[in-house]
Image (tube, coloured by chain):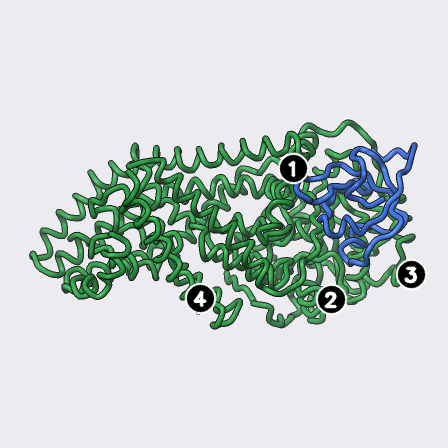
Amino acid sequence: MVCHNHNNTVIEGRDHTIYLVGSPNVGKSVVFSKLTGHHVISANYSGTTIDIMSGELRLGAETWQVIDLPGIYSLNASSEAESVTARALTNDGVIICVLDASHLSRDLQLAFDIQNYHKPVMYLLNLVDVAERQGITIEEEKLSRLLGAPVIPTVATKNIGIEEIKKTIPHLSHEASQKDKKLRGQSDQLIENIIQEVESYTPHPPAYLDRIGDLLIKPFPGLIFAVLILLIALAVVVGGGKGLRALILLPLINDWIIPFITNIVDLVVDQGVIHRLLVGEFGILVKGIEWPFALIFPYVLLFYFVLSFLEDSGYLPRLAILVEGLLSKIGLPGQNIVPFIMGYGCAVPAILGTRAATSYKQRLIVTSLISIGVPCTAQTGAFIALLGDQSMLALGFVFGLSILVVCLAGILLNHIIPGEKEAVIIEVPPLLLPDRSAIFKKIAFRLKHFLVEAEIPMMLGILLAAVIVETGLINWLGHALEPVIVHWLGLPKEASLTLILGIIRRELAVMPLLDMQLTTLQLITGAVVALFYIPCLSVFIVIVKEFRLKIASYLLIGTTLFAIFMGGIVYQIGQWLP
Amino acid sequence: MKLPNCQRGKNFRIINLPHDQMLSIFSIASGSIIKVLAKQPFKGPVLLQINRRKVAIGYDIAKQIIVEEVVGFGLS
């Protein structure tokens, strides 16, 4: 199976191509995952799909290419997502149009627009469970007759209706989709008539989830719940992570795995440079296992557990709406809040996520803020490992400073970057109890991504560190950077290593400090430098791709200078305090 | 009356509104009946219900939407 993402390129259609079309947050990506067996990140809010994904579906002897298009409300080509979809649909293939059973009237316009492409089409009536919960029933046979195409009720997250889709695909034909020609050039009146025909609504007291969903979005008690939910999330990630690390991972790795590896290396390799590169101070087989697995992994795991749960429940847009008033003042209005929160996981999907519905100005602000002062989950893990054991107060200080700087930078950037304020219109998704298997799949997907993306650069970084230390290059480097590292920042010469490694990954700007026996003030200074220091190599590449090299270079130079400036300020002030 | 000045929990009819494609997608148009569910602090969005859908409208657009109160109209 192959899975590529076409970056806004034109998709070449074949006869056996299936286009998945539908409004945002209707569950296209879930249907795509279920049909192709590929996992793609989906969540319970609009705009999760930012790239066009394609995958394969085998039906008997035939192979179909399935293409997941970004969510759109109409086909007027008024946004990037709409033109991409419109362009894709000019190629050959069949269309699966996913409709939201709980919001059928909104989606019918798109259902009609699709028919103008004269392709075999089938409609999925997804989220029938949510509709049912709200007292809505839809007669799919009637709807099918009116639309002149098959209509299949589905609950994609629970696999309901998926087999039915697979059975129907080979039987789709052009004739069916063109039967009801009178439906073309419809009006709002026609949509209303259809709704009256097929939909029945029994008002009944809202289900408890809907009632909770409503409470969570009112200032009172919503804001109180928001604080509680964030505190619980923090407790799970920080507390749970420390527990996992201290009770399971550290003993396992330090008492069993690393001694075991060291013993083998002792047997096979003679004392010398190679031996030290493998298991010495920065031995890749020692630090390359201890750092990612014992120190970072527990936090990454728990962070993604919490994030995936919040994403699928539909809570994040509610949180965004609650705090929009405040955050719009620091340059983070509406649709940008969720990508910004994602930045605390990893900056790469966060920056890509801003593509969904925002202006250039807004994208630039979010990207800058994340690059300047939002630590990714791996770096957060490194901070907890570095500071958490010494003083929770120091940890709190570093995160407090991060928030303060992000707010000030946001206000500043919002003023100096030209551009219009954009319209904020956010649809509130239903509150859902996330499906357990979907959550586990999502966490597994993200962890795999983390291990592949993080482990290799981290190993290379550690190898680089080992080479710098073993060849004595560290002395030269320490000497060269002495005015900055020693005099301005008050750190030992060897700390110059962090500035080199920090280019590769954010947490590598922190990790080398662990074994340097630093004072609390030095730890805080080092952490502050690492926090504001340049984003990692992969983020830099993404910024170049999304914004041009010029912007990326500004951010690179700006963050480096700012990090050293802030670190020095903290050290110089800290020195005078008792 | 401007939308952000509306009392929450009441129903309103839209009289005038700026042109925005997103608004029409949610069938927020002249003459539509909406219910104000909540107003978020610090000039945050106005949360309203239209048909059975809940949509948050940012303050900047909301203040351009002119409405009048509808009495005795049942929008649950």
Picture coordinates of residue A4 (x, y %)?
52, 64
Q: Chain of mark 2?
A: A
Chain letter, colour green in render: A
The kind of residue tagged 2 is Ala
Dot 4 and dot 2 residues touching (CB under 8 Å): no
> Which residue has dot 4 on it?
A541
Q: CA distance from mark 1 to mark 2?
A: 30 Å
Residues at marks 1 and 2 on the same chain: yes
Q: The residue tagged with tag 3: helix, strand or loop?
A: helix
- Mark 4 or 2: in front is 4
Q: Give the colour in which the image draws chain B.
A: blue
Q: Which of the two labelled residues, at mark 4 and mark 1, occupies the earlier sequence position?
A: 1
Mark 2, residue position: A77
Residue at 17% in and 44% down: A260
Q: From the image, tell me which residue sits under label 1.
A: A431
Indicate the quadrant where residue A87 lies.
bottom right
Hey, what amino acid is under mark 4? Ile
Foreground mark, 1 or 3, reads: 1
Chain where mark 3 sits? A
Q: Is residue A107 left or right of residue A513?
A: right
* Dot 4: element: helix
Q: Which mark is residue A509?
A: none
Q: Are marks 1 and 2 in contact (CB under 8 Å)?
A: no
Quadrant for the C terminus of chain A, please.
Answer: top left
Residue located 63% across and 54% down the image: A47
Compared to residue B59, the image places residue A66 above or below, namely below
Please report whichever mark, 2 or 3, sits nearer to the chain's N-terminal start. 2
**Gap between marks 4 and 1, in whole Å?**
36 Å
| Distance between the alpha carbons at the discs numbered 1 and 3 | 38 Å
Give the CA distance from mark 2 to mark 3.
24 Å
Chain of the residue on which disc 4 is drawn: A
